[in-house]
Image (spheres, rainbow, N blue to C red):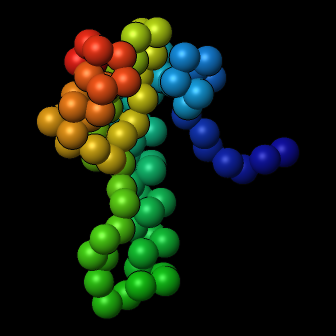
Amino acid sequence: MSNTKTVPYEWCDTCQKRGFLDDHDAEKALGRARARRERWADQNTPGSRRGMKRENRVYECPAGLLHLTELSRRAHNARAARWSGVAA
């Protein structure tokens, strides 16, 4: 029996990423991802976390699933506009 505690997700064929069905699961996954990266940073780079990439918000994709991203809302919308012609 595995002792991992994954948050339930579905694979998003549109974005090729893990997608969460509701806000509760997405926020839970965001908290777990942050904690995991902070633990890693404490163990491997105890002096500084500068430049460390870390998920900081949730966004909804065109398929209706929620994804985690490290990008700011402005950067994400600019990138989405370039990809599809419509800001997400």
Q: Is there any visible trace of residue 42 in the rendered image?
A: yes
Which residue sits furthest left?
A: 74
Which residue sits furthest right?
A: 1
Say which of 69 and 23 sits in front. Answer: 69
Say which of 80 and 27 sits in front. Answer: 80
- What is the total number of numbered labels drawn onto the structure image? 0
Residue 79, picture quadrant: top left
User: Is residue 50 shown left or right of residue 5?
Assistant: left
Say which of 83 and 13 sits in front. Answer: 83
User: Is residue 82 shown left or right of residue 65?
Assistant: left
Q: Residue at x 45, y 70 (%)?
A: 39
Quarter of the figure that contains the N terminus: top right
Q: Residue at x 28, y 44 (%)?
A: 71
Placement of 66 over or under 2, stated as above or below: above
* Residue 12 in the image, given as x and y percentages of width and height: 57, 20
* Residue 45 in the image, given as x and y percentages of width and height: 41, 85
User: Is residue 6 shown left or right of residue 33?
Assistant: right
Placement of 34 over or under 1, stated as above or below: below
Q: Is there any visible trace of residue 10 in the rendered image?
A: no
Which residue sits furthest top?
A: 63
Placement of 33 over or under 67, stated as above or below: below
Q: Residue at x 61, y 18 (%)?
A: 13
Residue 8, picture quadrant: top right
Quarter of the figure that contains the C terminus: top left
Residue 68, picture quadrant: top left
Q: Residue at x 62, y 23 (%)?
A: 11
* Residue 55 in the image, given as x and y percentages of width and height: 35, 48
